[in-house]
Amino acid sequence: MQILDTDHIEMFVGDARQAAHQLCATYGFHVYGHGGPETGLTGQRSVLLGQRDIRILLTSGLNGDHRASRYVAQHGDGVSVIAFGCTDVQAAFDEAVAAGATPIEAPRRLEHDGSVVVTAEVSGFGDVTHRLVQRVSGEQFLPGAIAETPVPTTDADLLHTIDHAAICLQAGELDPTVQYYERVFGFTMIFQEYIEVGEQGMQSKVVQSPSGGVTFTLIQPDLSRRAGQIDDFLSWHEGAGVQHIAYSTHDIVTAVRAYSARGVEFAQTPASYYDMLEARLGAVDVPVEQLRPLGILVDRDHWGQMYQIFAKSTHIRRTYFLELIDRHGARTFGTSNIPALYAAKERELAAVRDTTDGLRS
């Protein structure tokens, strides 16, 4: 199966226009298209956002029976579809179903104004599915969306691609999910780690498509340890789902400064983290004096360095947030950043957890 990249993600949200406004105002996304019943989208309203190679489709159901409405009622706003760009959707669909994927929507050829797109949909994890997309010709994103010319902003587009998606799974589902992506989509496991944050524990494995264009970080809680943020996600989200999407940037310092100026809050890192940073990692590409005040973390793998930071969640359930990652040659993940990232997230959630006992029950 030839999976090229993450073609787009679709988020089911309560109000697509409001969600679009927030992402445009804070992270500099542009509106690339919109649609609703007046354009042939039955029972829904969608807004397409873009920035460089990133596409986000925001969809709201207009009645209680719509799939997006049911998703939001159970999970709140969240990532519902992760679409894979493919060279041959029919072949990819047949191969996936033969390997055990549940068919959601059979391949169909969509034509509009000279554009031809072939799509299909199969099961993923939890309530998240995978849309298979083959762009045959033209620039139409999907039928039913009215294209708009993106309005330029004063700031450069600082986000480039979807680097990876982090997915929280129920305890005991990690290995079966890894095996599912290996068997159905031909992914391989490229990294694994046991993460300890205080008295919490979580197991993580990373799977990636053969092209390297799609990467999933899969995480399950260790039930023998104290309940923590992965347990919180599974409870508050009511099941497995996407905890965060990581977007790549080529200048994380500039990006964090720009987004902070627009009101984005990022997870804080203790000053002590930076005291021994160069002794632990050696020389780093970005001066520590720039990293420290912004809370940016740095690590390395066999190929190079990576710089990462979590944004604080603005989700009403605290079940979804964004990550920024700047890879300086690194291809996988470092063994120090992941615990540090989740320790920062734990500090953010600690105060929230005390006031959300009802959500955890």
Image: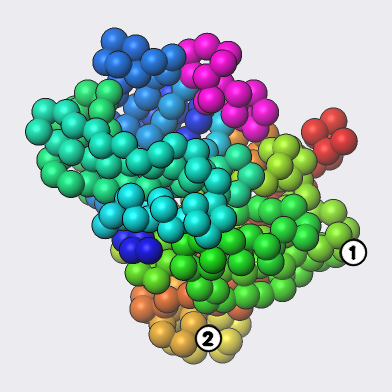
Choose mark 2 or mark 1, whichever is in front. 1
SS of the residue under disc 2: helix
**Residue 55 appears in the picture as rendered:** no
Camera-side residue of 335 and 164: 164
Whether 249 is drawn above or below 15: the answer is below
SS of the residue under disc 1: loop
Q: Which residue is mark 1?
A: 224
Quarter residue 284 falls in:
bottom left
Q: Which residue is mark 2?
A: 281
Q: How many neighbours does mark 2 have within 10 angstroms: few (below 14), some (14-19), or many (20 or more)?
A: few
Write down the region rendered in magenta: 61-76
From the viewer's perspective, tell me whether residue 172 is left or right of residue 191.
right
Camera-side residue of 123 and 308: 123
Q: Is residue 63 magenta?
A: yes
Q: Is residue 149 magenta?
A: no
Quarter residue 249 falls in:
bottom left
Q: How far across and down, in percent of the image, does residue 359 sit?
A: 80, 33
Which disc is residue 255 wearing?
none
Which of pointers 2 and 1 lies earlier in the amino acid sequence?
1
Q: How far across and down, in percent of the image, does residue 306 sit?
A: 45, 73
Which residue is at a point 29% across and 10% down the rendered structure image?
A: 38
| Tag 1: amino acid | Ser
Query: The N terminus lies in which quarter of the figure?
Result: bottom left
Query: Which residue sits furthest left?
Result: 114
From the viewer's perspective, tell me whether residue 14 is left or right of residue 9.
right
From the viewer's perspective, tell me whether residue 309 is left or right of residue 220.
left
Camera-side residue of 68 and 117: 117
Number of numbered discs overlaid on the protein picture: 2
